[in-house]
Amino acid sequence: MKSKASFFPSKKISYEKQTRIELAAAYRILAEKQMDDLTYTHLSARLPGSDFYFIYPFGLLFEEVTASSLLKVSLDGDILEGSESQYNQTGYVIHGSIYKSRPDINAVFHLHTTAGVSVAAMECGLLPLSQFSFHFYNRLSYHSYDSLALNYLRQGMNLADDLGQKKAMILRNHGTLTCGETVQEAFLYAHFLEQACKVQCAALSGGQKVLIPSHEVCEKAARDLREFEPDFGIRDWTALLRKLERTDPSYKD
């Protein structure tokens, strides 16, 4: 895997500690952006090539997560390090199943925002209405709702199969899921998907006919947006980490 840039103003740290810090930062940033849902939804990250990942303990708010509080979990859902108040079966089915099927993926974000769930309940799915949405043009998967994800063999495999080789998915009647080779890539897709869903909800609520660019324009925009910078998300992620350093560096604890 090619080297990815990162931002840490302090001394050199281990790759595992760096992964923990970046994931804790993602939890804090999404809490600040009000994209969390009480103690539900979850973000995870793994070291490239490893057979475990980090995820928050079920029962914490996103704003409470720190690097040291994160659990280390095997791809089969065994808690390797840390403890939680209740075993988070749905989280481990979702994240473990994706990591097993996608060795290229090192971060998975699952959210229940109002805009994301609203679009997930629309038969049309995500429409190419905005530049935010062009990131996902012909690059978005859909997964039909099947109650809580409690079964690795059936529900977990179905979810991973529906994701395929894409990095974003609408979970019908449920929410959104984004992935990345890095935490910053998964984060930026989560941000853009949320913005795309917000725009769609606002545009459709206006009662006016909406404009949809041609297939050729949408496809060109999708390619251009993804090829605009070599390390997707690092510019915005670095800026957000600078802000977090100023406002509350306790996420690194």
Image (tube, grey):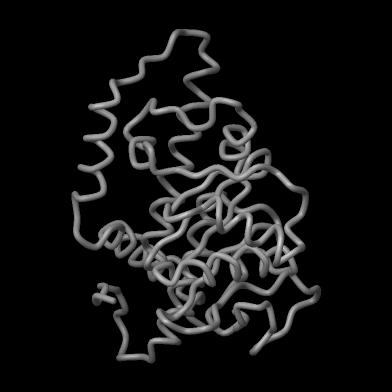
Q: Looking at the rendering, which quadrant does residue 113 occupy? A: top right
Residue 251 lies left or right of residue 242; in this view the side is right
Residue 99 lies left or right of residue 240; in this view the side is right
Where is the N terminus found, in terms of image quarters? bottom left
Residue 5 lies left or right of residue 175; in this view the side is left
Residue 208 lies left or right of residue 71; in this view the side is left
Q: Position of residue 135 (x, y in %)?
A: 34, 42
Identity of the residue furthest to the right in this view: 86
Viewer-side residue, 250 vs 236 = 236
Residue drawn at (70%, 43%) of the image? 145
Q: Position of residue 249 (x, y in %)?
A: 45, 74
Residue drawn at (61%, 82%) of the image? 74
Q: Position of residue 76 (x, y in %)?
A: 66, 78
Viewer-side residue, 106 vs 115 = 106
Q: Looking at the rendering, which quadrant does residue 231 occupy? A: bottom left
Compared with 4, 90 (above or below) is above
Identity of the residue furthest to the top in this view: 208
Q: Position of residue 61 (x, y in %)?
A: 66, 64
Residue drawn at (62%, 70%) of the image? 64
Viewer-side residue, 226 vs 56 = 226
- Label count reads 0
